[in-house]
Amino acid sequence: MSDAALLTRAALVAARAHAGQTRKGGSIPYVNHVIEVAHLVAEAGGTPEMAAAALLHDVVEDSDATAESVARDFGPCIATLVACMTDDPSWEDLPRGERKKLQAAHMSGAPRAVRRIKIADQTSNVRDVGRLPAGWNPGEARDYIAGATLVVDACRGADPGLEAAFDAARAEALAHLSAREQGGDPC
Amino acid sequence: MSDAALLTRAALVAARAHAGQTRKGGSIPYVNHVIEVAHLVAEAGGTPEMAAAALLHDVVEDSDATAESVARDFGPCIATLVACMTDDPSWEDLPRGERKKLQAAHMSGAPRAVRRIKIADQTSNVRDVGRLPAGWNPGEARDYIAGATLVVDACRGADPGLEAAFDAARAEALAHLSAREQGGDPC
């Protein structure tokens, strides 16, 4: 399979899996997030397999897709990356702070390719949360960013460019939240 | 830019441009269609640039993106492919049959890369219409398929594999419509 066939196939599977799903509290289609994560990974020099895994990183967690269907359609390498990006189902009902601690512990022992995707994932999330879409208040957003920072800190050493992109997204999100809390408009 | 960076960037621009848009009469996100077109093109051996143009083929027609913004972000080659896939705005209010005749005449003189994307586009459309989503009746669907056949016939010689995929999609859609019109369930 060519790289273009692989990436468009992964995008199609993700688009179908996430059809109708939106980002928490907003109207942004969920698939836009996974495409953004894949783009961050690819722009930072990630391989097509990493970008494909980024496109697919939430299909097992959030759709009818299974680890087996990903392995069948995309092979064991991409399936392993997706499996490492998938939260343990037992974490689902935990408070966000606890979940982030478990994600961080999991990432500290994960392969470098997984840590690269995870940093991009957290960057996309922090960018979105920092804009305070409907359904988020500044306190929740700050909590999320603190948790994401914990996760990314556990991934450091994987890719300086992606780490810098996260740091920039975090700084921008915190500045935006401060401006909002002070009643100003940062834009 | 790597092929993975190009394709994920094109997918991201398309996902943002088509956010909230759905296929006519249904709930399928519009972006799923352009990703399917890109996947058909890539699976048939199309280049990454062709697949990127397929991802972007409706952004000028259906969003705030312009020919200039596509050229700025993706370069002249991809911008030319997208421009060739964009209907003339003066066709917008014409009946579908007239519009399809104009598309066919336009395609008969188009570069081979454009004709390949157009065949994939019509294949995706015929697959969707043949399933009779909400908003389509069998007569409209048959009219659409006849128009798409005219367009694909004008593209023939571009890619035997894509042409065969269109022919198969057309046959399946017509069989499904016949079964529906006879009151049976073809599934």
Image (cartoon, coloured by chain):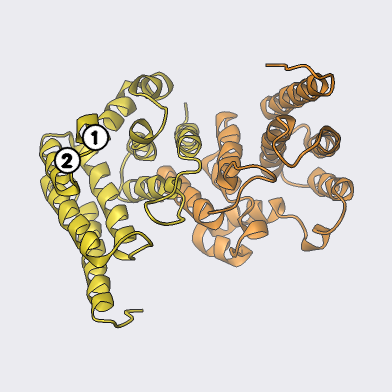
Chain colours: A orange, B yellow
**Residue B91 percent location from the top left of the image:** 20, 35
State which chain disc 2 sits on. Answer: B
Which residue lies under the disc numbered 1? B87
Q: Which mark is residue B107?
A: none
Q: Earlier in the sequence, mark 2 or mark 1?
A: 1
Camera-side residue: B69 or B28? B28
Would residue B146 be found to the left or right of residue A128 on screen? Answer: left
Asked whether the viewer can see residue B164, the reply is no
Amino acid type, callout 2: Gln
Q: Secondary structure at mark 1?
A: loop
Q: Quadrant of residue B87?
A: top left
Which residue lies under the disc numbered 2? B103
The image shows residue A147, relative to residue A184, as above or below, that is below
Q: Distance from label 2 to label 1 (Cα)?
A: 7 Å
**Residue B156 percent location from the top left of the image:** 13, 48
Q: Quadrant of residue A171?
A: top right
Q: Secondary structure at mark 2?
A: helix
State which chain disc 1 sits on. Answer: B
The image shows residue A166, relative to residue B39, as above or below, that is above
Q: Label 1 neighbourhood size at 10 Å, few (<14), some (14-19), many (20+)?
A: some
Mark 2 vs 1: CB contact within 8 A: yes
Amino acid type, callout 1: Asp
Would residue A103 be found to the left or right of residue A42 on screen? Answer: right
**Residue B92 percent location from the top left of the image:** 24, 37
Would residue B116 be found to the left or right of residue B135 on screen? Answer: left
Q: Assign the C terminus of chain A to one quadrant of the image.
A: top right
Q: Label 2 neighbourhood size at 10 Å, few (<14), some (14-19), many (20+)?
A: many
